[in-house]
Image (spheres, rainbow, N blue to C red):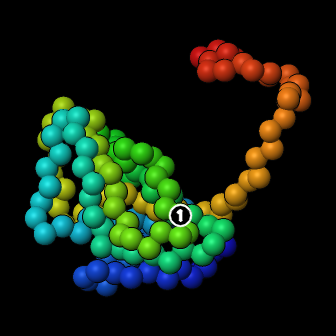
């Protein structure tokens, strides 16, 4: 699906269009669209606007994911990672950021705050059954194969 066109409306500067930092990047960076800086206290989360609006084709979604640099260096992540933007949503893309560090973190206008991945999505037809097929794993849950 490389180079699939995705319609986008940008509120404000057109240099805010998401971009891939490298040729092999799966995620495109998105930036904060702020009138003033926002401070995230330790343990606090806030919704950060991007000024971006998408027309996502049916059968696709946008996944909102953390930027590894913000997580590793500052303890800041996307709270509902990965967040999902459905194909029928036409509102502004906002990112729920959380500060997992012990220090306040300041978000500035134009700061790269998350990355988005465009992915195919499938809607399943759910069929209720009386029992399910057996597998070697069975109902073994969290950690059943060891740490």
The mark total stands at 1
Secondary structure type for disc 1? loop
Occupied quadrant, residue 35: bottom left
The crowding category of the residue bearing disc 1, from other C-alpha atoms within 10 Å (few below 14, some 14 to 19, many at least 20), is some
Residue 61 locus on image (x, y percent):
57, 64
Query: For mark 1, what is the residue?
Result: 86
Q: Is residue 125 left or right of residue 131?
A: left
Foreground residue among 17 and 128 = 128
Occupied quadrant, residue 91: bottom left
Residue positioned 15% across, 40% down in the render: 41
Quadrant housing the C terminus: top right
Tell me, yes or no, if residue 118 can be seen here. Answer: no
Residue positioned 86% across, 27% down in the render: 131
Q: Is residue 97 left or right of residue 25?
A: left
- Residue with the most extreme left position: 36
* Residue 13 higher or lower than 24, as above or below: below
Quadrant housing the N terminus: bottom right
Tell me, yes or no, if residue 128 can be seen here. Answer: yes
* Residue 27 higher or lower than 51, as above or below: above
Q: Is residue 70 left or right of residue 137?
A: left
Residue positioned 61% across, 67% down in the render: 60
Residue positioned 27% across, 54% down in the render: 47
Residue 21 locus on image (x, y percent):
43, 67
Residue 40 locus on image (x, y percent):
18, 45
- Residue with the most extreme right position: 133
Q: Is residue 106 left or right of residue 45?
A: left
Residue 87 locus on image (x, y percent):
55, 69
């Amino acid at each position: 699906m490389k180079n699939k066109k995705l319609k986008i409306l940008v509120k404000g500067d057109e240099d805010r269009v998401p971009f891939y930092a490298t040729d092999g990047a799966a995620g495109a960076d998105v930036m904060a669209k702020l009138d003033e800086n926002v401070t995230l206290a330790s343990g606090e989360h806030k919704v950060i606007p991007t000024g971006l609006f998408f027309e996502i084709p049916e059968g696709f979604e946008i996944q909102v994911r953390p930027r590894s640099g913000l997580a590793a260096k500052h303890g800041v992540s996307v709270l509902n990672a990965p967040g999902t933007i459905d194909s029928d949503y036409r509102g502004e893309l906002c990112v729920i950021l959380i500060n997992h560090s012990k220090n306040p973190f300041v978000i500035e206008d134009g700061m790269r705050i998350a990355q988005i991945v465009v992915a195919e999505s499938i809607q399943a037809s759910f069929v209720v059954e009386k029992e399910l097929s057996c597998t070697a794993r069975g109902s073994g849950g969290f950690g059943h194969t060891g740490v």
